[in-house]
């Protein structure tokens, strides 16, 4: 049996996927920050990015709520309000990076993964949120959102997917 040297090892694919998912998350967040500023937000990027204005679970977005439920369920204790911002960041970044690793495993098994593969990847990440989060009672079902909201959310995830795919393709050329 001859090994296909064009395919990455699983560890190499995961490492490159982690890198790609990190850069993809930064790209998505950059787009979301520009939208925030265009919509009248005046916070600086670092403050916005790291949820500095989240002080309680009532202010926390869905990623933080998922993390809170995981923590509460696994450890059978409640997280205090002052952990909402930290959990939001851990879950948001963890989800983006972990999805990058999953992309790395899939794309790393292909001879020549294309950047456009990021389109179905980003759309899949987007769509999974509209399955999991309503089931967890953290989002409404997808049909309750207007087209504009869905399009803005989808476009941000497409930026994530395409950036992740582009960085992964580029990272394949280098030894990590």
Image (cartoon, rainbow, N blue to C red):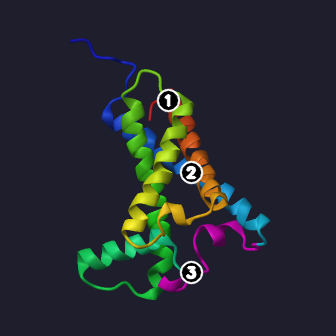
Q: Residue 54 carries which label?
A: 3
Q: Position of residue 51 (x, y in %)?
A: 58, 74
Q: Which residue is drawn at 69% across and 66% down?
A: 45
Furthest toward the front, the residue is 143
Estimate the x, y position of residue 38 in percent, counting from the top left: 79, 64
Mark 1 or mark 3: which is in front?
3
Q: Which residue lies furthest to the top in this view?
A: 2
User: Vertically, is 112 above or below 92?
Assistant: above
Q: Name the residue under label 1.
A: 174
Quarter of the rendering containing residue 91:
bottom left
Distance from disc 1 to disc 3, alpha carbons, whole Å, reads 39 Å
Q: Is mark 1 on a helix, strand or loop?
A: loop
**Callout 2–callout 1 Cβ contact below 8 Å:** no
Q: How far apart are marks 2 and 1 (CA)?
A: 26 Å
* In the depicted structure, whether residue 169 falls above or below residue 103: above
Question: Which residue in the protein does label 2 denote?
Answer: 157
Could you tell whether 143 is left or right of 28 in the image?
left
For the residue pair 89 and 28, the one nearer the viewer reads as 28
Q: How many marks?
A: 3
């Amino acid at each position: 049996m001859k090994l296909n040297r064009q395919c990455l090892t699983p560890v190499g694919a995961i490492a490159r996927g982690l890198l790609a998912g990190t850069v993809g998350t930064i790209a998505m967040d950059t787009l979301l920050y520009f939208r925030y500023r265009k919509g009248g937000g005046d916070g600086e990027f670092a403050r916005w990015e790291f949820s500095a204005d989240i002080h309680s679970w009532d202010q926390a977005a869905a990623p933080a709520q998922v993390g809170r439920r995981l923590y509460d369920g696994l450890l059978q204790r409640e997280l205090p309000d002052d952990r909402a911002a930290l959990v939001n960041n851990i879950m948001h970044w963890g989800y983006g990076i972990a999805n990058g690793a999953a992309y790395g495993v899939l794309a790393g098994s292909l001879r020549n993964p294309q950047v456009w593969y990021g389109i179905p990847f980003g759309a899949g990440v987007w769509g999974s949120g509209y399955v999991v989060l309503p089931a967890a009672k953290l989002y409404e079902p997808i049909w309750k959102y207007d087209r504009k909201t869905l399009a803005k959310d989808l476009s941000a995830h497409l930026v994530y997917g395409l950036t992740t795919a582009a960085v992964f393709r580029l990272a394949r050329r280098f030894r990590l």
